Amino acid sequence: MQALKLSNGAEIPALGLGVWQVPEGPVTEGAVVAALEAGYRLIDTAQAYGNEQSVGRALRSSGLPREEIFLTTKFLPSRRDPLAEMKKSLERLDTDYVDLYLVHWPQGGPTAAWPGMEAAHAAGLAKAIGVSNFSAAELATVSKSSEVAPMANQFQYSPFLDRRTLVEACLAANVVPQGYSPLGTGEHLDDPAVAKIAATTGRTPAQILIRWSLQRGVSVIPKSSTPARIKENYAALDFELDEAAMATLDALDTTNHTPEAKAPGQKWWS
Ligand SMILES: NC(=O)c1ccc[n+]([C@@H]2O[C@H](COP(=O)([O-])OP(=O)(O)OC[C@H]3O[C@@H](n4cnc5c(N)ncnc54)[C@H](OP(=O)(O)O)[C@@H]3O)[C@@H](O)[C@H]2O)c1
């Protein structure tokens, strides 16, 4: 499995399974088990997703040693205490630690949750801590004022939302960039340029989109609750897009390579 290096020395797999909008219960359990069987070793959940318990059950039932799996969850910033919420997550996940704990979005300002995130890290409950939906400026603000700097930033990323300046800011600060919604939550799969590259390479549109992120040096976490698609997406590790295909995909960007993590006016909290 390809991996990226975190500043704590650990490796984070380049490709993982995301489980946003996958309901707690057999569907989440089935998706996580299918992913682990296919070879995935990174699972991305969040307190907001309401499915940590099912993720935990699937990890247990896989029989894989805990240390072989990279588990991410995210602090829900409408709550007050990242350390207390970490402990509750660990109970639901039925494990002693997570590999990565992210502030889900910068509610209350970029540094609001950070002391509590550092406390979860100091207690050994989160091996790595990071942020999500942080712009380059927000990332710099939290890095400057922290004892333990963020180790990863997860943001929406695809050829259509090629936040290249944000990726570069992450890499310059030794922060692993991780892309979410690589398929545009399914909306980019029918794009004609993507379909054409898929047809000429003998790959599927989902594989093309996932592969583009991997070749841009960004960790990526496509979601599917369908075992055959979970397997299909994993095979994005097995081929390469040539320069012409990468350039065609690059041309789909609508953000002018923004350093922002979200579109103007877009936010997840009130
Ligand atoms: N940090 C954040 O704020 C944030 C926000 C959004 C997402 N995320 C993370 O990123 C993950 C992925 O993003 P996302 O859930 O927005 O969506 P996505 O991965 O871009 O797309 C998922 C959609 O594509 C479909 N799909 C997946 N593989 C397919 C394939 N091979 N062929 C055809 N359709 C396929 C899925 O359908 P089926 O499931 O029916 O197969 C689902 O409808 C999330 O699950 C979550 O872990 C994080």
Image (spheres, helix red, strand yellow):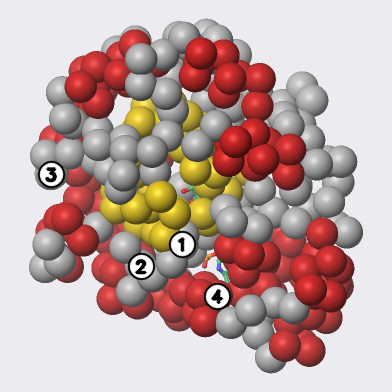
Numbered disc 1: secondary structure: loop
Q: Nearer the viewer, mark 3 or mark 1?
A: 1
Q: Is residue 222 placed above or below 40 in the rendered structure?
A: above
Residue at image point 60% right, 36% down? 172
Q: Position of residue 266 (x, y in %)?
A: 72, 26
| Residue 103 position within the rendered picture, expressed as x and y whole percent measured from the top left | 43, 26
- Crowding near pointer 2: few (<14 within 10 Å), some, many (20+)? many
CA gap between label 3 and label 1 equals 23 Å
Q: Amino acid at mark 1?
A: Leu
Q: CB under 8 Å between callouts 1 and 2?
A: yes
Q: Which mark is residue 40?
A: 2
The mark closer to the camera, 3 or 4, is 4
Tell me, for residue 94, which label it has, or none: 3
Which disc number belongs to residue 236? 4
Residue at screen point 52% across, 25% down: 105
Q: Is 185 above or below relative to 112?
A: below
Q: Are marks 3 and 1 in contact (CB under 8 Å)?
A: no
**Foreground: 15 or 223?**
15
Using the image, tell me which numbered label, if any, was put on residue 15: 1
Task: Look at discs 3 and 2 and give the one toward the viewer.
Answer: 2
Work out whether 131 lies above or below 64.
Answer: above
* Mark 4 vs 1: CB contact within 8 A: yes
Q: Earlier in the sequence, mark 1 or mark 2?
A: 1
Residue type at the position of mark 4: Ala
Question: What residue lies at 72% left-to-right and 29% top-to-bottom?
Answer: 260
Q: Are marks 3 and 4 in contact (CB under 8 Å)?
A: no
Question: Reading the chain from its start, which is encountered first: label 2 or label 4?
Answer: 2
